[in-house]
Amino acid sequence: MTITAELIIRLIIELFWIYASIFAIQSTKLQYWKQCWYIVLLGSIIHTGYIFAAFVDNPYAGIFRNIGMGIVAIGIIMLARRTKHILG
């Protein structure tokens, strides 16, 4: 089990992303934006799985990181497109 300062910092940042996503879901009224934030939340939870897999030196930890960040990116792109559509 390898616990490094880098992984601890990544975990703290990831927990912040999860908190921010939950806060955004609770505070937004537009259903489409809620769906986008749910996607970001899902990606953040999967990415947190990468951090825990890295703690136990799992060789497949990188897969969790790539899938999680890919899902987060999809959610952010959906948010950006919708915002651009609304604002013109």
Image (tube, rainbow, N blue to C red):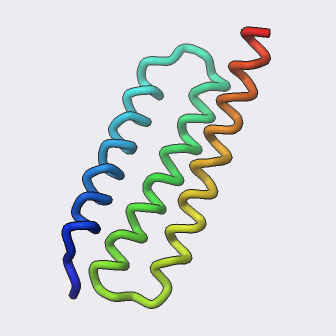
* Residue at the outermost front position: 6
Nearest the eye: 24 or 14: 14
Image quarter where the C terminus lies is top right
Give the side of residue 85 with respect to residue 67, left or right. Answer: right
Report the number of numbered marks: 0
For residue 31, which quarter of the picture? Answer: top right
Image quarter where the N terminus lies is bottom left
Task: Give the answer, above or below, for where 78 lies relative to 58.
Answer: above
Give the side of residue 33 with respect to residue 62, left or right. Answer: right
* Residue at the outermost top position: 87
Expressed as whole percent of the image width and height from the top left, the position of residue 36 reads 62, 35
Q: Residue at x 68, y 29 (%)?
A: 80
Expressed as whole percent of the image width and height from the top left, the position of residue 29 reads 54, 14
Expressed as whole percent of the image width and height from the top left, the position of residue 45 reads 43, 56
Give the side of residue 14 with respect to residue 4, left or right. Answer: right
Q: Residue at x 61, y 25 (%)?
A: 33
Nearest the eye: 13 or 75: 13
Give the side of residue 69 with respect to residue 9, left or right. Answer: right
For residue 85, which quarter of the picture? Answer: top right
Q: Residue at x 27, y 67 (%)?
A: 6
Q: Residue at x 37, y 28 (%)?
A: 23
Expressed as whole percent of the image width and height from the top left, the position of residue 41 reads 48, 45
